[in-house]
Image (cartoon, rainbow, N blue to C red):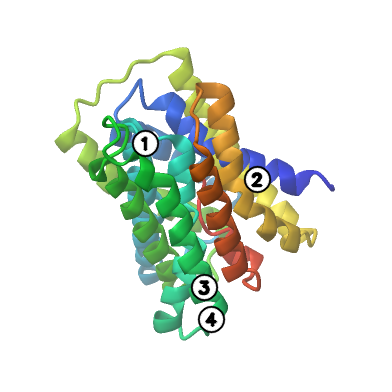
Amino acid sequence: MPFFPATFVLLWSTGFIGARYAMPHAEPFTFLSLRYGLALILLLGAVLAARAPWPDRRTALHAAIAGALIHGAYLGGVFYAVRHGLSAGIVALIVGLQPVLTGLLAASVLGERVGPRQVAGLALGLLGVALVILPKIGDGGQMSLATLAPAFVAVAAITLGTIWQKRFVTGVDLRTGTALQYLGALAPTALLAYATETMVVDWTGELLFALLWLVLVLSIGAVFLMLVLIERGAVSSLASLMYLVPGVTAVLAYLLFGETLTLLQLAGLAIAGIGVAAATRRSSARAAMETPAP
C-alpha cells in the first residue's frame, strides 16, 4: 500500500512520545522492565504457537547480549534522558545519528567500506546536533550535560548492539531471536530497577496507554509493518523516510506537549537529517531498520 511507509515512520516516531507520556508515572528502568516482560510473554506465546526454531546456545547468548545493548542500554538511555527533562524531539535527533555511526564502526569491525560521503554525513549530523543542543545548555537549567549524557550513551549502545547483531547473530528466526533479545534486555534492566529505583508505579490511564502502545504498536506492530514493507519491495522509500523520524517526533511533541524549538534549532534538525540521509543513502534499508523504536 502506498501509505504504508509514511504510516511506519509515524508509528516509529511515537515511540519517543510514548516515553514522554510514561515517564511522569514510573521510573525508567521500572517501566522498561514492565515493557520487556510483557513483550517477552507475547513473543514466547507466538514462538510456542508456531513452534519456531531456537538457535544454538552460543548464538542465543550473542542474541541476548545484542538485546542488552539494543534494547536495554539504548532504551534505558532514551527513557532516562526523557525522565530527567530532555525533550522527546531532541532525544530523537541525537539517536538519529546511529545509522552513520554504525556505518563508520562497521568499517573497522566488519570490513565494510566507508567513503567521504559517510565522513561528511557524520560531520553534518554532529553540526546539526550541536546547533540544537548548545543554545540550551545551561539556559536556566533546561539542558545540561547530565541530561544529555544518557542520550549519547543510548547512541553508543545501539551502535555497538547493531554491530554485535551483524557480527554474531545471523540466520536466526525473527520470533525466537527477538524473544532472546528481550530476555537479554530484561535481566540487567530489572536489576537496575531493583538496585537504583523505588519501583513504585503510578497506574494511571496515561501509563497504561503508553505501556500497551509501546508493546503492541511499537515492539510488535511496527516491526510487523516493517517486514511487510520489505517483503513488498518498498525498502528504498522506507529507508529514506526513516530520516524524517526526528522531525516528525518534534512536530508530535509540539502538538501534544507544547515542546518548542528555536529557528536555530530547527535549522540544526534539518542539517542533521540531511547529513544522516546523505551518509546512508546507499545503505541497505534493512540495516537502517535495525534501530528499535523507543
Are there few (<14), some (14-19), or many (20+) residues within 10 Å of tag 1?
many
Residue occupied by mark 2: 9
Say which mark, if any, is on residue 116.
Answer: 4
Whole-number angstrom distance, CA of label 3 to CA of label 4? 6 Å
Q: Distance between the residues labelled 1 and 4?
A: 32 Å
Front residue of this view, candidates 166 and 149: 149
Amino acid on which disc 4 is placed: Pro
Q: Mark 1 points at which residue?
A: 86
Q: Which of marks 2 and 3 is nearer the N terminus?
A: 2
Q: In the rendered structure, which disc, 2 or 4, sits on the residue that comes first in sequence? A: 2
Residue type at numbered disc 2: Val
Among the two numbered marks 1 and 4 on one chain, the one whose residue lies closer to the N terminus: 1
| Residue 120, label in figure | 3
Mark 4 packing: few (<14 Cα in 10 Å), some, or many (20+)? few
Q: Quadrant of residue 155?
A: bottom left
Label 2 to label 3, Cα distance in Å?
25 Å
The answer to whether the residues at label 3 and label 4 have Cβ atoms under 8 Å apart is: yes
Return the x and y of residue 122 as percentages of the image width and height: 48, 67
Q: Residue 115 carries which label?
A: none
Disc 1/disc 2 C-alpha distance (Å): 22 Å
Give the label, 3 or 1, closer to the camera.
3
Residue at 59%, 24% in the rendered image:
255
Residue at the extreme right: 1
